[in-house]
Each structure stands twice: as structure tokens, then as C-alpha cells.
């Protein structure tokens, strides 16, 4: 379907704390952050919110409804990425019962946003009852990415047609693509084999089944509407001019 004919349910969130979500390629000692929550993280945040609202039945319903739907994000206008080293505890190479963890240092990045973040969900064939339930679930989400990366819900609206200033998958034929505005590329994860019968059990934290990278969770390259403005050894400032 042409994106011009699409309907989108767009939720807005206001960042109220630092955001951090490490890339799947990062190590425990070198954790560069993504600049936006991933589609995978957004969908699981909705499932988590549904669990907290009404339990497993609503969570399953939400998961089956959104698992195959496209999610796009529009990041806040201003982004400052803080580069820092922190103290961590990790397991030693030579394990000792009296010292299960040792002190170490690790590189971490944290995002400071200014402005609203928008999350767009493909609303094709959704009826009013579906949209009302999704709106309630979206209102119960209070963080994305790492725990403590808090966001405040700011409402939803329906939009028809082309999305301007949202992340774009690569390759992209979207008319909204402007090379001078999309200066950042990052790999974001998404749900993989959505038709797997046991997929819901695999995302359930209380299940023994696990998510396999490359099968149930896949990485895809996206263009982000950010351009680097300035940088130093301790921070980098980006701006979304879309």
C-alpha cells in the first residue's frame, strides 16, 4: 500500500529524564546508545502496559494486533548525547566464591532531549474500539528503553498520508526523504518471525522460552532526521530540522 493512503495513530511523549538504550552490537564495557526507542521496544512497551492494565488477555490481544504493524518515530528537535565513564560491577574471568563480582569501568552514553517525541502506529483497518483500547494502553506507558528513561504521555491523534520528519527504513522510497535532513543511520530492532505460534511466550518474562536475535528479533537500518551541530570530548549536540 502506498504510504500516502495510510492512516497513522500518532502518540506524543515528553521526555522527563535521560534516555539510554544500548545497541545490540554494544558490549558491557562499551555502550553507545541509540537515539530513539526501537520499534521492538515500542511494541514491547505496549504489551507491558497492557499486562499492567488488565493482565494477560489484553496483552495477548495487543500483541496480536500490533506485531505485524509498522511503527515509525519522530525524535525530539534537540538531542545532546553525553559521553561518560561509569563504575560497574562485572563477573571476573577467574571466578571466586568469595568475590563473585569485581569493580570495573564502562563507557556509557545518555541522551538529553528537548521537545516531544512522536510514535506513529500503522492504523490500517482499525475500528474505533481498537483505537480506544490502544489509546488507553499508550497512556499507561511511562518509559522506553532502559528502566528510568521516563516519558510523559501527551495524547494521540489520527493522521492520514505521508509522515514528515519520522525515521525512515533503508532502502527508502518515501517522498519525505531529504538527504540534507537525514544525517544519522542506526540499526534498530524489530519483531522478526511474527507468525511463530509461541512468539507471545517468548516475549513473556515469566516464560522459559527466549528471544533469538536474527530470528524473533531482527536488526534493520534506519535513517534518523538528525544532523550533528557541534561536539566535544564529553558531549555531541544534534538537531532535528525536519
Image: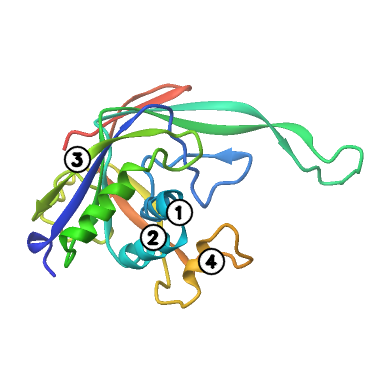
SS state under label 1? helix
Residue 82 visible in the displayed image: yes
Give the number of the disc on residue 181: 3
The image quadrant where one finds the N terminus is bottom left
Question: Residue 98's x, y, as percent?
Answer: 92, 38
Give the mark, 1 or 3, whose residue is nearer the N terminus.
1
Q: Nearer the viewer, residue 81 or 179?
A: 81
Give the number of the disc on residue 58: 2
Residue lying furthest front: 54
Give the mark, 3 or 2, whose residue is nearer the N terminus.
2
Q: Is residue 29 left or right of residue 71?
A: right
- Asked if the residue at tag 2 contacts the one at tag 3, i.e. Cβ–Cβ closer than 8 Å, the answer is no
- Asked if the residue at tag 2 contacts the one at tag 1, i.e. Cβ–Cβ closer than 8 Å, the answer is yes
The image quadrant where one finds the C terminus is top left
Q: Is residue 179 left or right of residue 110?
A: left
Mark 1 surroundings within 10 Å by alpha-carbon count, few (fewer than 14), some (14 through 19), many (20 or more):
some
- Asked if the residue at tag 3 contacts the one at tag 1, i.e. Cβ–Cβ closer than 8 Å, the answer is no
Amino acid at each position: 500500500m502506498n504510504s500516502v493512503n495510510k492512516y497513522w495513530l500518532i502518540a506524543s511523549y515528553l521526555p522527563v529524564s535521560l534516555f539510554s538504550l544500548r545497541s545490540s552490537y554494544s558490549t558491557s564495557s562499551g555502550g553507545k546508545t541509540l537515539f530513539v526507542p526501537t520499534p521492538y521496544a515500542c511494541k514491547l512497551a505496549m504489551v507491558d502496559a497492557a499486562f499492567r492494565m488488565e493482565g494477560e488477555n489484553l496483552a495477548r490481544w495487543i500483541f496480536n494486533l500490533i506485531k505485524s504493524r509498522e511503527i515509525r518515530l519522530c525524535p525530539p528537535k534537540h538531542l545532546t548525547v553525553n559521553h561518560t565513564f561509569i563504575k560497574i560491577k562485572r563477573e571476573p574471568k577467574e571466578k571466586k566464591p568469595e568475590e563473585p563480582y569485581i569493580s570495573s569501568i564502562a563507557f556509557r552514553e545518555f541522551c538529553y532531549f528537548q521537545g516531544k517525541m512522536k510514535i506513529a502506529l500503522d492504523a490500517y483497518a482499525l475500528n474505533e474500539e481498537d483505537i480506544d483500547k490502544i489509546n488507553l494502553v499508550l497512556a499507561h506507558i511511562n518509559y522506553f528503553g532502559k528502566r528510568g528513561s521516563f516519558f510523559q504521555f501527551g495524547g494521540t491523534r489520527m493522521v492520514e498520508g505521508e509522515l514528515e520528519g519520522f525515521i525512515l527504513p533503508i532502502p527508502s522510497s518515501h517522498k519525505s526523504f531529504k538527504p540534507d535532513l537525514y544525517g544519522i543511520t542506526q540499526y534498530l530492532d524489530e519483531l522478526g518471525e511474527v507468525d511463530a505460534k509461541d512468539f507471545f511466550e517468548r516475549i513473556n518474562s515469566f516464560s522459559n522460552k527466549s528471544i533469538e536475535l536474527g530470528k524473533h528479533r531482527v536488526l534493520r537500518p534506519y535513517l534518523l532526521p538528525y544532523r550533528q551541530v557541534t561536539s566535544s570530548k564529553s558531549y555531541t549536540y544534534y538537531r532535528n530540522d525536519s
